[in-house]
Image (cartoon, helix red, strand yellow):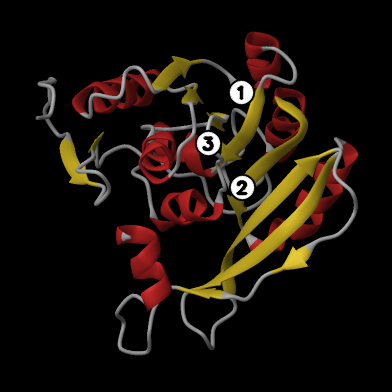
Amino acid sequence: MKNEVEIKQEERIDDLHRNGYFLIQNPKMFCFGIDAVLLSGFAQVKKGEKVIDLGTGTGVIPILLEAKTQGKHFTGIEIQKQSVEMAKRSVKLNGLESKITIDEGDIKQAAERYGASTFDVVTSNPPYMNSGGGLKNDFEAKAIARHEILCNLEDVIYNAAKLLKTGGRFYMVHKPHRLADIIVTMRQYHLEPKRLRFVHSYADKEPSLLLIEGSRNGKPMIKVESPLVIYQNNGDYTQEIKKIYYD
């Protein structure tokens, strides 16, 4: 049975289709999309490992990873107070207080806050648009989630590298047009790119997202995996997407 928590006006409860888990969201703020779900399917968490999600929003990635893996503990850090509060209520709603911790804070201070070489896995679904790209959304919470206003790509990668143990793994979802920046910055901070997968809405379309794994102090060699296609020609999810969502 789910724990009772307050659901505020304008909030909704979304079914995550995993372990009977649900997530509290406010449609007027930034709600998670398929990119977060894909990241939770791409990230590999081994039994007993400690995981931190940088810029966790309403906590969807830690909750999904707890459902899908045998990780020991999951931490999410988020700077937006309202998102943190919703994430904490979602953790309580699902009875996961002993497995998931949600902290309010700036990821730029994450390494200082938690200590260097503390985690086995770092995940992030960061803002995609740099300061020169795209239009700012009028609503502040959505703008912060989508644009590099409070943190940028280097902030995410630098702190991920500091937080990871040697051999620890970093998983991120981002936009293909930032790939050169991503690889250069990862190598600058000794996160060697190891796996790369492009995500396409349809098989005949250009990729709209990328998934990347890096290893702290890893040896140079990257595996480019087969493309991940979201939709069949008829608009239904492909079998692989259905498996990521529901299996």
Which quarter of the picture shows residue 236? bottom left
Question: Mark 2–mark 1 contact, CB under 8 Å?
Answer: no
Give how far across and how far down residue 184 sits, in percent. 86, 49
Residue at position x 40%, y 57% from top? 34
Amino acid carrying mark 3 in the image: Lys
Residue 121 place in picture, x, y as percent: 62, 35
Q: Give the numbered dot on residue 47.
A: 3
Q: Is residue 137 left or right of residue 215?
A: left
Label 1 close to label 3 by CB (< 8 Å): no
Badge 3 element? loop
Quote the CA–CA distance across marks 2 and 3.
20 Å
Q: Position of residue 179 (x, y in %)?
A: 74, 58
Dot 1 or dot 3, earlier in sequence: 3
Residue 107, label in figure: 1
Tell me the amino acid under the disc marked 1. Ile
Q: Which disc is residue 172 wearing?
A: 2
